[in-house]
Image (cartoon, rainbow, N blue to C red):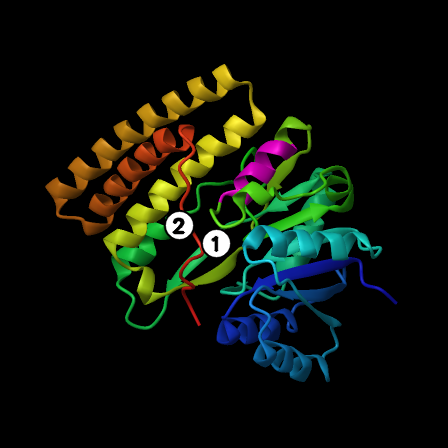
Amino acid sequence: MQANNLVAIITCQRPQGLLRLIKALQQQKTEESSFDILIVDNACQPDIAKLISSQAVNSHVSIYYEQESIPGIVAARNKCVSWFLKQQYNALVFIDDDEWPANENWLNKLVQAQKKYQSDIVTSHVISVGEQDTPGWAVKLIYGKNKFQEGQKLTTFYTNNLLIRRPVLQQLQPAFDQRFAMTGASDYHFALRCRKLGFTAYYTDAPVIEEFPTSRANLKWFLRRGFRSGIGYSRSHLFEERFIIAILLCIFMFAMRVARGCIKLLYGIVTLNRTRVTEGLFRFASAIGTLAGLFGTKVNEYRVIHGK
């Protein structure tokens, strides 16, 4: 008998993280949220296929394996969606291969929240923990403190911890835009499209944990990430808004990011707080990216794979 929900994992050269996640999912309580697992391998590695096969043998949760040879997270996400729509699941749940649920009721909470708020989409926050030898200032910066409240209605969400009901994916085809194939921000663009179509999204307290690798704990990575996020914001609005509206939104966001960058940077310098200094520079990079995105600039977000 098919489960009610499908948990989808996109993986790319992270066997250790993937194995950790599979084992954590197998510990999930499923009284109200029976589920199957779909793993889409975007690197098409034989070792990953063997790993998944070994885990599926004695698993009480059905595990399915697919490959996506087209590089980029967009093609892999759309593979998950197309596979999901061929089955009869109620909801598709995305979680990343460098994450794992914070507790064994993670999926139950997402499903319960969807029913409680009668929402189309449910999301929760991510808790960052450092890989061994990752400096604390970087771990604190990547997600910071959770700012959302239970039952809060959201306009922006990402696919690192996300439940999407079937009708949303039936209407949005393809769900993720190939123009974001290697640049990142396809999930921000997806959220924008959902909002414009009137789909509702709510927050619930069902966090996942993400391991922040040491290879990302440097100023260059944060500046590049900020620059890329700014570009993604601009491109998303240019694709979905009237041109003049998109320009005005991007100019406003540029100004806001510069102002916030100044505040964070000055505070960090005065208090000798490296996290705040880096955050200030991150926001400056994001502001520059917001302008660059208006001129068609792109950054390859997935050139380097971080994590194991």
Look at the picture and state if 288 lies above or below 109.
Answer: above
Residue 52 screen position, x and y as percent = 64, 77
Residue at image point 37% right, 32% down:
290
Marks 2 and 1 close (CB-CB < 8 Å): yes
Of the residues shown, which amino acid type is indicated by label 2? Answer: Tyr
Residue closest to the eye, 208 or 52: 52
Describe the element under mark 2 as helix, strand or loop: helix
Residue at image point 48% right, 21% down:
246
| Residue 54 position by quadrant | bottom right
| Quarter of the figure with the N terminus | bottom right
Direction from residue 209 to residue 140 in the image, left or right: left
Direction from residue 228 to residue 46 in the image, left or right: right
Residue underneath mark 1: 126
Residue underneath mark 2: 143
Q: Earlier in the sequence, mark 2 or mark 1?
A: 1
Residue 66 screen position, x and y as percent = 69, 67
Real-space Cα separation, disc 2 to disc 1, in angstroms:
7 Å
Q: Is residue 186 magenta?
A: yes
| Residue 115 position by quadrant | top right
Q: Is residue 280 magenta?
A: no
